[in-house]
C-alpha cells in the first residue's frame, strides 16, 4: 500500500515527486535542511519536516533522521529521488525493515548494480555487450598485467562509484603507479571503498542510455534511449531522445537487449542502462555512424533527465515508480513519438565552469508551449554551496529535432536570472553549434567548444 | 620582494591543503583543493616563489574573494 510518500530529497526532484503524488491523489511529506527552508517544494507537499543542519551528511544523507521522520509523519513509503541515498542498498533495506515501501528497485538490485565490477559481469553473463575490463585490482602488479592485457590507454574507475567521479585515464605504463594511488584515494573518500578497476579507454565515445522498467515478476520493457554525450567534467549538460545520427535499428536492438536482460534478471521498478558507443573510424560523414555499444553501468533510480523520455513516450516515469512499488503492473506498450531535448541550467560560470553561489535577486523562467521547466528554486532564494549546482532543467519537444532545439533556445533566452552566474550562454552556444545540429556529438564536444 | 595574495574564487569549504608554509612553489602548483556544489576546485599558485602563509585549514568554510594564502615572489 502506498498512500503517503516521504520524499527523501530536495529541490527539483523533490518537487517532481510531490507533483506525481498529487497527480495520483497521494499525500506527500517533504524534508528540508536549514539551507532549503525557503524552497518552493515545501509548500507543495502535504507536510514538511525540518532536518537540522546544512551539510548533506547531516541532512539528506542522514539515514537515522530520515527514517525517524518517516515514522513521525506516518508515511508508508519513501521515494529517494536521485543522488543522496537513492542508490544506497543499506538505506533501502532499512526502509523495508521498518515496514515501509521503498519506491525503487528491490535493495538487492541497488547492491548488485552499486558494485560496478559485479554489474559488468552480470550483464556480460546475460549476453549484453561489455567492453574489455578488469576485476577489482589487488595491487600494482596486477594492475600492470591487466592494463597490458586490455591495452593502453586504460581508464581507472572506482568499483563502488559512478557518476563520473574519481576516474583517471592512464596513457602509458609510467603513469600507472601515481594514477592508481590518486584513484584509490578519491574512491575511498567519495564512496567509502578504495577498490578500483580498469576498463578500456575510449576516445570521445557517445553516451547513450536505455530507460527500462520491470514488474519483478518476469516482465520488463524498455522506453527507448536518451543521447547524453554533451557533458562537462563527466556531468551531463544536454540530453535528447531519439539519439541523432545513429542507426535506428542498432539502437532499438540495444534497447530490446536491455529489456531482455532485465526480464531474465527479474529486475523491478525503473532503471537506466548507461552505455558507451564508440564509432568506427571510417564512418562516412553523410551516413549514420557505425560503431559498437558497451555497458557502462546501471542506475537503479530515476535519472535527472527522465523528462526527456516522458516527453517522447507520454509515460510519467515518477508515477510509474510509485505505482510499481505499490504492486501495479507495467504499461502494455510504449511508443516513441516526436523529439525531446533537455538542457541543464547550472549555477556556474559559462566559461570557467566554476560554481556560483548567492541570492537569486531575480529568478524568472518561461512558460511556453512544448516546453517544460523543472526547478527547485524561486526568486529570493539563496543558492548555497552545500549541494549540486543544478538550477533548472528545461525540456522542449517538437515534431522534428530542429523544432525541439528551436523551442529550447527560445526558452533559454527567456530565462532571467540575477544573483548567480549561469551556464545559459554555453548551452545556447552548444544548441547553435554546427556539429551539434548535425548530430555529431560525443563526450569531447564541450572541451572542443571551450577551446581546451 | 613582492607578495601575491591567493583568494578563493568560490564560496565553499576547504577539502585538502596540499602544501605547507615554506614550500617552494611554481606558478600553477596546486596549493589546496576547495569543494563547492559537489565540485573540487584546485587553488593554484599565481606566481613562482615561496608559500609564506596558509590562512585556512581543512573543513573551513570560505567565502568568494576570501584570502587563502600568501606567496612571497621569487627574486627576479
Image (cartoon, coloured by chain):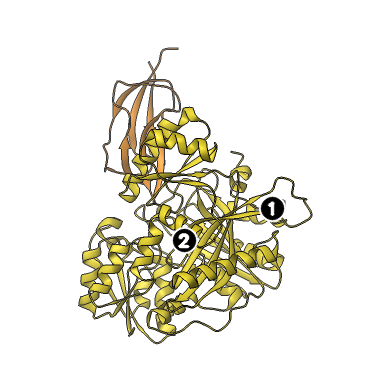
* Quarter of the image where the N terminus of chain A is located: bottom left
The percent position of residue A365, horizontal first and vertical second, equals 53, 67
Chain drawn orange in the picture: B
Chain bearing mark 1: A
Residue drawn at the location 51% of the way across and 70% of the way down: A212
Name the residue at 43% across, 48% down. A165
Where is residue A402, by image quadrant?
Answer: bottom right
- Residue A368 visible within the image: no
Q: Which residue is mark 1?
A: A440
Instruction: Respond whether the residues carrying marks 1 and 2 are from the same subunit.
Output: yes
Mark 1 or mark 2: name the one nearer the start of the chain: 2
Q: Is residue B59 visible?
A: yes
Q: Secondary structure at mark 1?
A: loop
The chain coloured yellow in the image: A
Could you say which quadrant of the image residue A82 lies in?
bottom left
Q: Where's residue A2, x and y in %?
A: 34, 83
Q: Is residue A278 left or right of residue B63?
A: right
Disc 1 from disc 2: Cα separation: 25 Å
Q: Residue at x 49, y 82 (%)?
A: A330
Q: Position of residue A353 (x, y in %)?
A: 50, 46
The residue lying at 40 percent from left, 53 percent from top is: A358
Name the residue that disc number 2 marks: A298
Observer-nearest residue: A165 or A99?
A: A99
The residue at the far bottom in this view is A25
Measured as percent of width and height from the top left, residue A178 is found at: 41, 31
**Against B37, is B14 above or below?**
above
Position of the C terminus of chain A by quadrant: top right
Circle number at residue A309: none
Residue at the far top in the pictured view = B76
Q: Measured along the vertical axis of the image, is residue A74 above or below residue A373?
A: below
Amino acid at each position: 500500500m502506498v498512500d503517503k510518500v516521504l520524499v527523501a530529497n530536495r529541490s527539483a526532484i523533490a518537487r517532481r515527486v510531490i507533483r506525481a503524488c498529487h497527480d495520483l491523489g497521494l499525500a506527500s511529506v517533504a524534508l528540508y535542511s536549514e539551507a532549503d527552508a525557503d524552497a518552493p517544494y515545501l509548500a507543495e507537499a502535504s507536510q514538511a519536516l525540518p532536518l537540522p543542519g546544512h551539510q548533506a551528511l547531516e541532512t539528506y544523507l542522514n539515514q537515522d533522521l530520515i527514517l525517524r521522520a518517516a515514522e513521525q509523519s506516518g508515511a508508508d513509503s519513501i521515494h529517494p529521488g536521485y543522488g543522496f541515498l537513492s542508490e544506497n542498498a543499506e538505506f533501502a533495506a532499512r526502509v523495508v525493515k521498518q515496514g515501509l515501501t521503498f519506491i525503487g528497485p528491490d535493495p538487492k538490485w541497488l547492491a548488485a548494480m552499486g558494485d560496478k565490477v559485479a554489474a559488468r559481469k552480470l550483464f556480460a553473463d546475460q549476453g549484453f555487450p561489455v567492453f574489455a575490463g578488469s576485476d577489482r585490482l589487488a595491487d600494482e602488479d596486477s594492475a600492470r598485467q591487466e592494463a597490458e592485457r586490455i591495452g593502453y590507454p586504460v581508464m581507472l574507475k572506482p568499483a563502488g562509484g559512478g557518476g563520473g567521479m574519481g576516474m583517471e585515464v592512464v596513457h602509458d605504463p609510467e603513469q600507472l603507479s601515481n594514477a592508481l594511488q590518486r584513484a584509490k584515494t578519491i574512491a575511498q573518500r567519495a564512496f567509502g571503498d578504495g577498490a578500483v578497476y580498469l576498463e578500456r579507454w575510449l576516445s570521445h565515445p557517445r553516451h547513450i542510455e536505455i530507460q527500462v522498467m520491470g514488474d519483478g515478476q518476469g516482465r520488463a520493457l524498455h522506453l527507448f534511449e536518451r543521447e547524453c554525450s554533451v557533458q562537462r567534467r563527466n556531468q551531463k549538460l544536454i540530453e535528447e531522445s531519439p539519439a541523432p545520427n545513429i542507426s535506428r535499428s542498432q539502437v532499438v536492438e540495444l534497447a530490446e537487449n536491455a529489456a531482455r536482460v532485465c526480464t531474465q534478471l527479474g529486475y523491478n521498478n525503473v532503471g537506466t542502462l548507461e552505455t558507451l558507443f564508440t564509432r568506427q573510424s571510417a564512418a562516412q560523414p553523410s551516413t549514420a555512424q557505425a560503431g559498437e555499444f558497451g555497458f557502462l553501468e546501471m542506475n537503479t533510480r530515476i535519472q535527472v533527465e527522465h523528462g526527456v523520455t516522458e516527453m517522447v513516450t507520454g509515460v510519467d516515469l515518477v508515477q510509474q515508480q510509485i505505482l510499481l512499488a505499490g504492486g501495479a503492473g507495467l504499461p502494455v506498450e510504449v511508443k516513441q513519438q516526436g523529439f525531446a531535448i533537455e538542457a541543464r541550467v547550472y549555477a556556474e560560470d559559462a566559461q570557467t565552469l566554476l560554481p556560483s553561489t548567492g541570492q537569486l535577486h531575480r529568478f524568472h523562467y518561461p512558460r511556453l508551449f512544448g516546453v517544460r521547466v523543472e526547478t527547485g528554486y524561486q526568486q529570493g532564494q539563496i543558492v548555497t554551496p552545500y549541494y549540486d549546482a543544478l538550477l533548472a532543467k528545461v525540456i522542449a519537444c517538437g515534431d522534428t529535432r530542429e523544432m525541439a532545439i528551436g523551442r529550447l533556445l527560445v526558452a533559454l533566452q527567456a530565462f532571467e536570472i540575477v544573483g548567480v552566474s549561469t551556464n545559459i550562454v554555453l548551452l545556447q552556444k552548444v544548441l547553435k553549434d554546427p556539429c551539434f545540429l548535425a548530430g555529431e556529438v560525443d563526450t569531447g564536444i564541450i572541451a572542443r567548444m571551450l577551446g581546451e | 620582494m613582492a607578495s601575491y595574495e591567493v583568494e578563493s574564487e568560490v564560496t565553499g569549504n576547504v577539502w585538502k591543503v596540499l602544501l605547507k608554509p615554506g614550500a617552494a612553489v611554481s606558478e600553477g602548483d596546486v596549493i589546496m583543493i576547495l569543494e563547492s556544489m559537489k565540485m573540487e576546485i584546485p587553488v593554484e599558485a599565481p606566481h613562482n616563489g615561496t608559500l609564506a602563509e596558509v590562512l585556512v585549514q581543512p573543513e573551513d568554510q570560505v567565502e568568494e574573494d576570501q584570502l587563502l594564502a600568501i606567496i612571497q615572489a621569487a627574486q627576479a
